[in-house]
Amino acid sequence: MGYKSGGEASLIAEIVEAEENSTSKMQNLRVPPVITINNSSAYAIYELLYIRDVPFKPQEYFVKTRKCESDADARVVKICERLRDEDGHVIEHTRVSFLSLAVYIGY
């Protein structure tokens, strides 16, 4: 316990382990933060966010496509079928949308 010039006590702590919320498993922190807790506080809550290192590289997902003729049908091309409206007409201009999501786990 250290003392400040004003005579009030304080505690300086280095956080070296954290409990993961989802598994309750203790993890060592690569760069431990240092916090100071003053004696004047009845309690202290510190919200710390860390990005966890993972032992594998991200996987890249892709879809191989090929151009369809406007009158092509799944029975002819086997893997290519065009989007059609309610009346059976081919929708010429369509786009496929992909969503990329990065997840950071904080503890």
Image: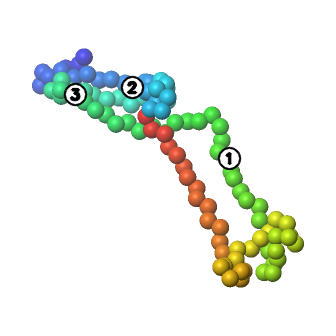
Residue at 45%, 38% in the rendered image = 106
Amino acid of disc 1:
Gln
Q: State the mark number for residue 15.
A: 2
Q: What secondary structure is found at the residue carrying circle 1? A: loop
Q: Toward the viewer: 52 or 70?
A: 70
Q: What secondary structure is found at the residue carrying circle 2? A: loop
Where does residue 19 sit, x and y in percent of width and height? 44, 27
Report the Cα–Cα distance between label 2 and label 1.
32 Å
Assess whether mark 1 and mark 2 are in contact (beta carbons under 8 angstroms): no
The image quadrant of residue 58 is top right
Q: Is residue 62 visible?
A: yes
**Looking at the image, is 27 positioned above or below residue 76?**
above
Residue found at the far front of this picture:
87
Report the Cα–Cα distance between label 3 and label 2.
17 Å
Q: Is residue 86 left or right of residue 2?
A: right
Which is more N-terminal, label 2 or label 3?
2
Residue at 70%, 74% in the rendered image = 83
For label 3, the residue is 43
Question: How would you rate the neighbour count of disc 1 (Cα within 10 Å): few for under 14, some for 14-19, many for 20 or more?
Answer: few
The image quadrant of residue 89 is bottom right
Q: Is residue 4 visible?
A: no
